[in-house]
Image (cartoon, coloured by chain):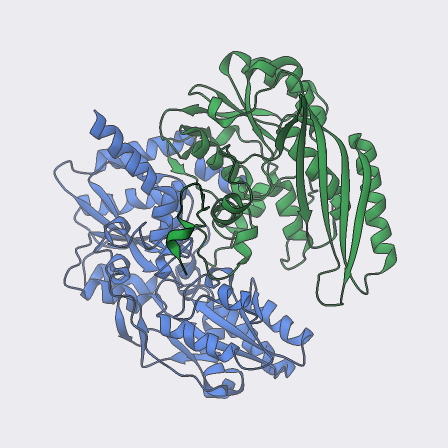
Amino acid sequence: MKFVDEFRDPEVITKTSEEIRRLAHPNRHYRIMEVCGGHTHAIYRFGLKDLLPSNIELIHGPGCPVCVLPMGRIDDGLSIAQQPDVIFAAFGDMMRVPGTQGSPLEHKARGMDVRIVYSPSDALKLARTNPDKHVMFFAIGFETTAPSTALTLGRAKTQGIHNFSVFCNHVTIIPAIRAILDSPDMRIDAFIGPGHVSTVIGCRPYEWIAKNENKPVAVSGFEPLDILQSIVMVLRQLKADEARIENQYKRVVPWEGNRAALRAMADVFELRPYFEWRGLGFISQSALRIRESYAEWDAEQRFHIPGVRVTDPKAAQCGEVLKGVLKPHQCKLFSKECTPEHPIGALMVSSEGSCAAYFNYEHRKTAMVTSIASVA
Amino acid sequence: MNLAAADSPGDHLPTVRFREPQIEMAHGAGGKASRRLVEGLFAPLLFSSSSEPLGDAAHLDFGGTRIAITTDSFVVKPLTFPGGSIGELAVNGTVNDLAVSGARAEAMVVTYVLEAGLPSPVLEAEVRAMGNAARKAGVTIAGGDTKVVEHGKADSMYITTTGIGRPLHRLNIDPRSVRPGDRILLSGPIGDHGITILLARGELDLEADLRSDTRSILPLVEELVKVAAPGIRWMRDPTRGGVATSLNELVRDCGFGVVLQEEMIPLHDAVRGACELLGLDPLHIANEGQFLAVVSPEYADAALNALSLAPGGEDAQIIGEVREQPSGAVLVTTRYGGSRIVDMLVGDPLPRIC
C-alpha cells in the first residue's frame, strides 16, 4: 500500500510535528479551519490533535454535504419516493440522516424501496434493470460529486432512459466559505483547503481569500502527513505575515482544476439564485439546479414537491457547530439526546460530520483525560 | 388495570427497557443496537434468572454433567462467495461459538427455511457443504427441520444451527476475571470475510484476490488451551461488528480498558486497501475464522508461540493489552503517536462520499 504508507511514516510525521511546534508562537492562539469534512474525519481518525501544541485550534468547517442539507430537503426527497413504483437511491451517507418522519433507512424498514448506491451511474443502472419503476437519485455533494451526477444525466439523455431522475442538492464550496468569513462571530487565522473539491475547481477560486481577506490557505490531502504539512505551510505564512494559496496536494490537485469535469457540470447545471444551508441559512448562488434542457430528468420539475421548510430542533446547535462557533461537545444535546445511533442533527450521522467524528474518536478520550486530571 | 396487584410481594416483574418503535437492520448487525435488543428485551423476559455476562454459548450443569449450548442463524447474501458458502458458514459459526466459550462441539441440529422456487441443485450444494464442514470439524449432525415459505417471502434460504459441546478441561472463561496487564491475542488477519462478501455482492466495481476466512477455529483454540489453559481469561470470535465490537463488549463486562497498537494488528493488503477506499475501519469488519483471547501476561509468550506454530495460526499476534484506563473504552494507538477511541459498530458500515 505504497500510496498511503509514505504519508504515515512515523519519522517524517514526528519531524513535521516538531516543525509545527517550532513555528507556533507560544503567546499566540491559532484558529485554523479545515473546510472539508474528509479532513475532519482524518484528524480524528488518526488522532492528529495529539501531535499539535495546545495553542493550535482546529475549527471544523462546513464541508460535509450531508450535514449542511436542511431537513426539509430530506422530507421532500422522501415524499417523492412515497409515490407508487418509485425507487429512492442515494449514497450510504444519506441513509441515516433524519427527516421529520424518520431517515431513509427507517422508511426502508417500513417498506419504502430504498437502495444504497455507490455512484450516480449505479442508480442509472438500477433504472435500466427496473424498467417498470422510476428511479430517483438523491444527489448530494460539493463539486466533488457534481461532475459524476452531470455525466450520468448526460448519459440518461443520450441513451433515452426516461424512468430516471435526479433530486439535485449539489452545493458549491466558495459561497459557504464566504458566508463563514462574513459571519461576525468568526475569527479564523487560516484555512486548510478542501482536497477533493479542488481536484475539480483547482486552486484559483480561493485566491480572493488571500487577497481580500488576508488569510493563508493550504489545499491539503487527507493523510496524516498531508494535513500536518498543510498546517506547517499556513503557520509559515502567518509567521512571515503573508497570505497566499499553497497547494500541498499537488500529486492530485491541478492548479487550474479539471476542465472536462467543469464543462460537464456547466452543460447540465446552473446556479440557483439562493439555497438554504443548515446552520448558515440562505446563501445566494450557493447551489446547483438542473438546466431546463434536462427538465425531464429533474425530479423537482417532474414531481410535485411539498417544499416545506423544517426548522431544526430548537435545542440542537448544529448551526453553531457547523460555523465552528461551538465545538461538538459544547452543544447542549451532544452525547445526551443526540448520539450516532439516535442522531438529531446530520452532523452526528455522517462519518465526516464533526459531531460523529468527535463522538466516535475523541469524546471519551477527553472524558478519560479529564477524569485522570481530576483524580490527580 | 390494577397495578398494585402486579406489584404484590413476590411478583417479580421483568423490566423491558427496549422501547424502539420498530426493528431496523441495525438490530441484526451485531453492534450497539443488537446489544440493546438482547439486553433490553430478550434477557429480561427470557433469561432474567441469570446475571452472567452474555457469552457466545451457555454452559449448563445437569447433575454434574456440564454441557455447552449455542445457536446461530445464517442469512448471508450471496449464498456462495470466494472461500465458502452459507452451508459451511452455518457449521463453522456454531462450532466456533462453542470453541470460544471453551467447549468442543459434539453434535448439532439444523433448520432450513427455504423459499419456494429455490433450485434443488443450490440446496444440494449447501447440504453437501454442511456435511463436509461437519466432518472436518468432527461434529455430528443429529437431526433437523425444514420449512418452506412462499416465493418472495424469504431470500433463497436461511439456515439455523444449534450445537451442543463438551467443556474443555481446566478453563475458566469469564470477562470478570480479566485484569490490567493481560494481553490481547488475535489468531490472524482480520476483515477477510466481511470484505469478501461486500465485493462478492458485485455492487462495487472493485476486485481483489481475497477469500472468506471461514473455518473451524477449534484446532487453534485447543493448541492454545494445551499450553496456556490457566492463563486464558476470555475468548470471542469477532464476527459481526468485528474486533472493535467484541473488545468493547469485553471492556463493558470487565470494567477496564483495552489499548491496541494499530501496527500489530494483522491485516491483508487487499482488506486494508478496500477499507481505505470505502472509508471503513477494518476493526469493524466481520470475521468467520479468527478469535481473540485475553491471556494473563505470564502465559502470553507461550500462547503466542503455540498459535504461531499451529497450521493456520502463523499470523497470530499480541495486538494490545488490558489497562486500568481508559476504563470502559478501547483506545488504538498509532506508530506516529496519534490515538483514537474505537467504539462498537453503530448501524452498518457506510462508505464516505468525499
Measured as percent of width and height from the top left, residue A375 is found at 22, 26
**A46 to B67, vertically: above or below:** below
Q: How many badges with numbers are in the image?
A: 0
Rendered residue at 58%/35% (across/down): B267
**B306 to A231, vertically: above or below:** above
Tell me where residue A29 sits by quadrant.
Answer: top left
Report the quarter where the C terminus of chain B lies.
bottom left
Measured as percent of width and height from the top left, residue B180 is found at 42, 21
Q: Is residue B214 visible?
A: no
**B109 to B352, vertically: above or below:** above
Q: Is residue A153 visible?
A: yes
- Residue farthest to the top? B298
Q: Is residue A348 left or right of residue B187?
A: left
Rendered residue at 53%/58% (across/down): B24
Foreground pick, B1 / A38? B1
Rendered residue at 66%/29% (across/down): B99
**B230 to B333, vertically: above or below:** above
Q: Is residue A318 left or right of residue B6?
A: left
Q: Is residue B211 left or right of residue A158?
A: right
Foreground pick, A311 / B161? B161
- Residue farthest to the left? A27
User: In this structure image, what is the colour of chain B?
Assistant: green
Query: Which chain did the renderer colour blue?
Result: A
Foreground pick, B105 / A88? B105
Measured as percent of width and height from the top left, residue B118 is found at 81, 61
